Amino acid sequence: MERRGPLAGVRIVEIDAIGAVPFATMLLADLGSEVVRVVQPGSTTSAIVPALYRGRQDLVLDFREPAAIAEVLELAAHADGLIEGMPPGSMEALGLGPDRCRARNPRLVYGRASMWGQTGPLAGQPGADINVLAMTGALHAIGTAEAPAVPLNLLGDHAGCALFLALGMVAGILGTQLGEEGRVVDAAAIDGVGTLMALTQSLFASGRWADRRESNLIDGGAPFYRSYPCADGGHVAIGAIEPAQFDALCAGLGFAPGTFAQFDRAGWPAMAARFAERFAARTRDEWVRSFAHGEACVTPVLSLAEAARHPHALARRPVAAGPTGAATAPQFKPGIGVAPPAREVSVREILRRWAD
């Protein structure tokens, strides 16, 4: 049966880049878009992390050749969207900026991914995921009381930029289908992470969030919302925020009802010490089995290898992704699975279909 997603028929040109761009276009490809990824000769990015580049048709073009620029413009003339992640001004210097591309195709939605955005004092400056987190307050808010923790590149590159870029592309293309002209989507990680921090910043502004790590309900400050080491060196994660969950946690640890006042912050250090003592007495998996059927919200902290093999992950993952392949989200009913592996194509092959 032919694989069709909700974005079937949408045509995207991806200018090869690292960071947010491949993640955003992976999502669009998984949802059914036809994505042509323009790569420079000798590129090996898709071989390193093939799951991230699935669903692409790879087109090798050398931007040093004028003919290559003309071919990208021709693709843009027949596409619904174009996505790039070069430093501000680079695409204009190549002759592939949004004004020139949209002169060929006014309905084109032109997506731009960056750390700092296309305008502002930091536009064009180098920066990585961690720098964006540092500048939005997110890095300050995550970690132990002693030092910030680095949450991989999940917040800046992927959540802060790629997800907002994909959303912006879908919104822009939907607009063109409703009769609007195309738009330029300026997806900056600094904006996306700032948006993700809306709840925390709002709580802080209203006096309900202390501006110190491990001092709040969901930043590791609460003894019932953090992880604890176990006897075997493994860890369990606790998310017992609701009173019924907290009661179940205390009962599972062997404490009598009323031993602790859950939201008495003055008592949190002593509560945490007693929780830690109990968890340290048994192995991770023993605790997981003990809490398996209760309300306490106790789960194991799984390694990458364990997470890939967990029965729930396997049950939710499309068969096409394989035992360690990345699944896609959100899921649709009926399901569409993940996009197939990347393959190389020619400009002629693409334009033969797109120009019809």
Image (cartoon, rainbow, N blue to C red):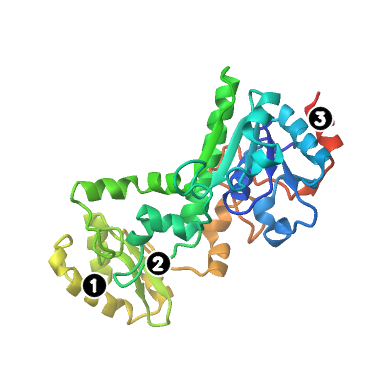
Q: Quadrant of the N terminus?
A: top right
Amino acid type assigned to the residue bearing label 1 in the image: Ala
Residue farthest to the top? 179
- Residue at numbered disc 2: 149
- Disc 2 versus disc 1: nearer the observer: 2
Question: In the image, what residue type sits under mark 2?
Answer: Ala
Residue 275 in view here: yes
> Looking at the picture, how far across and down is residue 152, in whole percent?
49, 62
> Which mark sits nearer the N-terminus, 1 or 3?
1
62 sits left or right of 254 in the view: right
Q: In screen coordinates, is 70 left or right of 338?
A: right
Residue beneath the point at 60% across and 42% down: 89
Residue 272 - label: 1
Task: Report the residue at 67% width, 41% height from top.
Answer: 93
Cα gap from disc 2 to disc 3, whole angstroms = 48 Å
| Amino acid type, callout 3 | Arg
Instruction: Give the residue at x 68% y 51%.
Output: 53
- Distance from Cα at disc 2 to Cα at disc 1: 20 Å
Residue 72, quarter of picture: top right
Circle 3 sits on which residue? 353
Secondary structure type for disc 3: helix
Q: Earlier in the sequence, mark 2 or mark 1?
A: 2
Q: Residues within 10 Å of mark 2 (few under 14, many from 20)?
A: few
